[in-house]
Image (cartoon, rainbow, N blue to C red):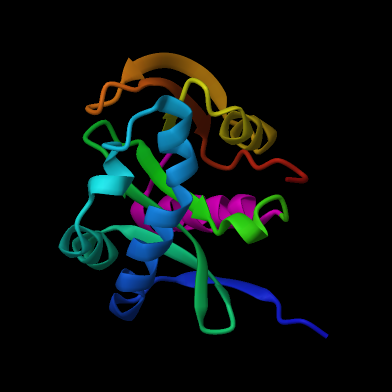
Amino acid sequence: MGMSVTISEATDQDAEQIFRLQYLCFQSEAALYGNYRIDPLVQTLDSVRAEVAEDCVFVARLGEEVVGSVRGTITEDGAAAIGKLCVHPRLQGHGIGARLLRAAESALADQRGAKRFRLHTGHRSESNLNLYRKVGYETVGTSQGADGVPMIVLEKQAGRYAATA
């Protein structure tokens, strides 16, 4: 019998694994846009450590290995910004991303008072868009990332969870 994937809050000891996983996972996004300077690929380990210490960060673990992560923080307008959701390529398509989102959303609403959630994804990132729509996010606009990638902005109200993911 195989191990189960568990979801938990990240600790400082997870920062290096999150950093490595993020670099691996966002290679396909970079290739999709022909831009290897996207934020997740140029972020420093120290910056990841700071986010783990300050933000709402969850990881998915398979045994001791971090196989997924997501981050969230409260913005100036009171919304929760969720970002850098990633799942190891060998485990994608098994609901881990949706479980990570749910954990982050619950913590951001319950512990930090978020009333709505906002995230951004690249306009060509169909698998990301499908996941976000499946769990209740709706397109509310567009923006351009600091790296020049056209982004789609999605939001949903706190408490809106999809029955399945």
Residue at 25%, 28% in the rendered image: 147
Q: Quadrant of residue 46?
A: bottom left
Residue 116 visible: no
Marks counted in the figure total: 0
Picture coordinates of residue 42 (x, y %)? 23, 47
Residue lying at 37% horizontally and 54% vertically, measured from the top left: 23
Q: For the point 30% across and 37% down, which residue is it?
A: 38
Q: Main secondary structure of the magenta part?
A: helix
Return the residue nearer the eye: 150 or 116.
150
Splitting the image into 4 quarters, where does residue 117 fall? top left
* On screen, residue 47 above or below 80: below
**152 in magenta:** no
Where the N terminus falls, by quadrant? bottom right
At 36% across and 40% down in the image, what residue appears?
A: 81
**67 on left or right of 143:** right
Magenta segment: does it hold 115? yes
Q: Position of residue 159 (x, y in %)?
A: 58, 42
Q: Residue 124, position in %: x, y?
A: 52, 22
Decide if residue 79 is in sight here.
yes
* Residue at far right of view: 1
Residue 142 found in image quarter:
top left
Quadrant where the C terminus is found in the figure: top right
**Looking at this view, is 133 or 147 the one in front?**
147
119 or 4: which is nearer to us?
4
Taking 145 as reference, is 130 left or right?
Answer: right
Looking at the image, residue 11 lies above or below residue 135:
below
Point out the stretch of residues depicted in magenta. Answer: 95-117
Q: Residue furthest top?
A: 141
